[in-house]
Image: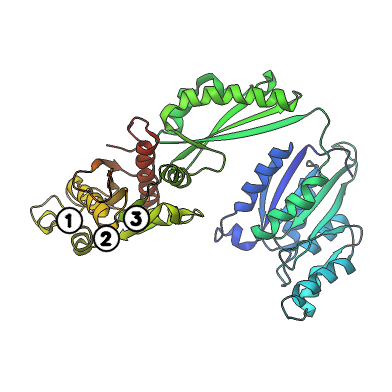
Amino acid sequence: MSSTHQFAAIVSVGDELVLGQTLDTNARWLAQRLTDAGLVTLEHVTVPDDLDAQVQAFARLAASADVIVCSGGLGPTSDDLTRQVLARAMGDALVEDPIALAQVEAFYTARGRTISAMNRVQAMRPASGSTIPNHNGTAPGLQGLIRTPAGVAGPERRCDVFCLPGPPREMFPMFEQHVLPRFRLTAGRTVRTRVLHTFGLAESDLAQRLGTLMDRDALLKGQPMVGTTASGGVVSVRLRYEGSATPEHASSLLDDCERQVRDGAGVYLFGTGNDTLASVVLSLLRQASQNLGTVESCTGGLLSASLTDIPGSSACFGGGLITYSNALKTQLVGVPEQQLGPGGPGAVSSETARAMAVGGLRTLGTDHAIAITGIAGPDGAMPNKPVGLVWIARASTTSRSNTGNPDVDCRPFMMTGDRASVREWAAKTALAMLWQHLAGVPAMKLLRQV
């Protein structure tokens, strides 16, 4: 095996990933854990369920990486080829592993079933490789070594390969328990990372605020490197130190860098690490012993779903109403009919958004209510109301028994992109408005607010 592990590559296997039918969240998780462990990820590769394509990917990556971590393709069916791929890349034959077979048999026995001939395939491994226990499924993982012969590119290379099942509930614990401890890191080399999240600023505006912190030569100067990535309106700031400093000194350098990032991002910074707008809002509600209700039109429950995706949300999320039609806007939250009819401001207006939010407080009996009404498209545009126009209102009261005079914040936004983008941005922007209120930060203008 190679003396130390410094560079890694990630391989994600599956036609569904290549075709975009399934989102590859495994690669993102693995990249973060590899970085945290002190390895530099050189490349992410997604390959189809094709033997030759996978073998070629393994061979190419093994020529430059010290470690390959692969997820997927370890099931019992004919399109699960990772065992054969690893064996061929190693120049090895597949053999049945008795320990792995006993584990697979025990999995089925515990469920009152008998292992089939198809499932016995999952106990196969390259002859010179080994298996990785899987306590949450039927597919053991695999470990092997790919040797790249010496040539014009340099001396012989040896790359350790770890193959894990695709389901996260199986892969995550296997990586933590059986792969992470097998990494051999370069002595005296430290890698530390942090991530901070902002919402309401364009990525370019945030970069301008951070200024020289985003110097691409920072690592060469012994300082943390700062970069930004944008996804669904959230702009994340990633800090990474990589060098010879002690872990304590590296953490101190990151502390100082984080303070500067916070100063630059200001009131637009809402969380760190695994925080989301929904999780931060729920945390603030929980701390204040308050709860929230939602009244949604164009987002059709997307806002509520983002909240209920968070475990424990029932402690502070009271419920939601989908008032998609004008009739339900009137029946459920009391929007006046004349307001929605001819001559009125209409469903997509400040008046209606406010009435929805205030009506939500009353109907749901919560401390806060968020209302969203807009035109997600691609149809539905009206004079002076183009596709993408969204009104969002937040109503809050100090007493659930008295909702007669709530505090209301109502703002118009001009969202861009397709229907899905408009709806996603609207839901996140609504959460950002409530976050500003709960966190006690100034109600600064948010991106796309008009």
User: Do we see residue 140 in this rendering?
Assistant: yes
- Select label 3 or label 2 by which is in front: 2
Q: Count the numbered circles shown.
A: 3
Residue 21: percent from the left, percent from the top? 54, 61
Specify the quadrant of the image occupied by residue 443: top left
Label 1: which secondary element: loop
Circle 1/circle 3 CB separation < 8 Å: no
The tag on residue 335 is 1
The tag on residue 323 is 2
Q: Nearer the viewer, residue 440 or 140?
A: 440
The Cα–Cα distance between marks 1 and 2, rounded to whole angstroms, is 10 Å
Label 2: which secondary element: loop
The Cα–Cα distance between marks 1 and 3, rounded to whole angstroms, is 18 Å
Label 3: which secondary element: loop
Judging by the rendered image, the residue that carries numbered circle 3 is 299
Picture residue at 25% right of the left edge, 50% below the top: 357
Question: Callout 1, which amino acid?
Answer: Val
- Select label 1 or label 3 by which is in front: 1
**Which tag, 3 or 2, sits closer to the chain's start?**
3
Question: Callout 3, which amino acid?
Answer: Thr
Circle 1/circle 2 CB separation < 8 Å: yes
Specify the quadrant of the image occupied by residue 442: top left
User: Do we see residue 41 in this rendering?
Assistant: no
223 on left or right of 21: right
Residue 401: percent from the left, percent from the top? 25, 51
